[in-house]
Amino acid sequence: MGRAGNGPRGRFRVHSEIVSCLFCEIVAGRIPARVAFQDESVLAFHDINPQGPVHILVIPKRHITSVLDLTPADDALVGSLLRRATDLARSEGLAERGFRLVFNYGEDAGYSVYHIHLHLVGGRKLGWPPG
Ligand code: AMP
Ligand code: ZN
């Protein structure tokens, strides 16, 4: 799954099945989100259940299911997710005191929305190791 293209209406195809994805729906504008940034390939929006004073999700507009679905062709896209997240960290005032960038995957990490997303969390002291 994973690499099927983003449909115009926020749905993508897995084999012959049309599947709907929460973050594709946000990209398509059918589910509202508090957008922090967007360009033609990247969307950043505030997490609905923030784990800190700042909690932003940075996603590719194209559906990619998880980090395990990335290929070398996605290297530039991953770089732009990372650079956009660090730009947002600066503009949110986190660059001095620090922040955390996280990609979750799988049950042990509590991966719950299967559209790749980079978490930017900051604005408070963050424990290590994470829970
Ligand atoms: P993960 O556990 O890495 O899969 O993270 C998924 C994140 O998506 C969680 O932090 C959720 O709070 C967040 N989330 C779920 N639904 C929405 C939504 N409609 N708008 C914004 N964030 C959401
Ligand atoms: Zn998606």
Image (cartoon, rainbow, N blue to C red):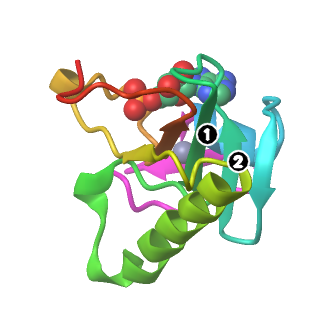
Question: Which mark is first along the chain, 2 or 1?
Answer: 1
**Is residue 79 in view from this perspective?**
yes
Magenta span covers which residues?
1-21
Discs 1, 2 touching: Cβ within 8 Å: yes
Residue 98 drawn at (x, y percent): 47, 47
Q: Residue at x 53, y 73 (%)?
A: 80
Residue 29 is labelled as none
Which SS type dominates the magenta stretch? loop
> What is the three-letter code of the residue carrying label 1?
Ile
> What is the three-letter code of the residue carrying label 2?
Glu
Disc 2 element: loop
Q: Residue at x 29, y 54 (%)?
A: 67
Image vertical order of residue 71 relative to residue 67, above or below = below
Q: Residue at x 77, y 48 (%)?
A: 36
Check disc 2: other Cα within 10 Å, few if <14, some if 14-19, many if 20+. few
Disc 1 element: strand
Closer to the camera: disc 1 or disc 2?
2
The reply to whether the residue tagged 2 has its Cβ within 8 angstroms of ligand 1 is no
Q: Residue at x 23, y 18 (%)?
A: 131
Left or right: 111 with respect to 96?
left
Image vertical order of residue 31 relative to residue 28, above or below = above
Residue 108 drawn at (x, y percent): 16, 23
Between 102 and 13, the one nearer to me in the picture: 102
Left or right: 86 with respect to 31?
left
Q: Which residue is mark 2?
A: 92
Give the Cα distance between marks 1 and 2: 10 Å
Residue 56 is labelled as 1
Residue 97 in the magenta stretch? The answer is no
Residue 87 drawn at (x, y percent): 63, 65
Residue 102 drawn at (x, y percent): 36, 44
Q: How many numbered marks, from 0 up? A: 2
The reply to whether the residue tagged 1 has its Cβ within 8 angstroms of ligand 1 is no
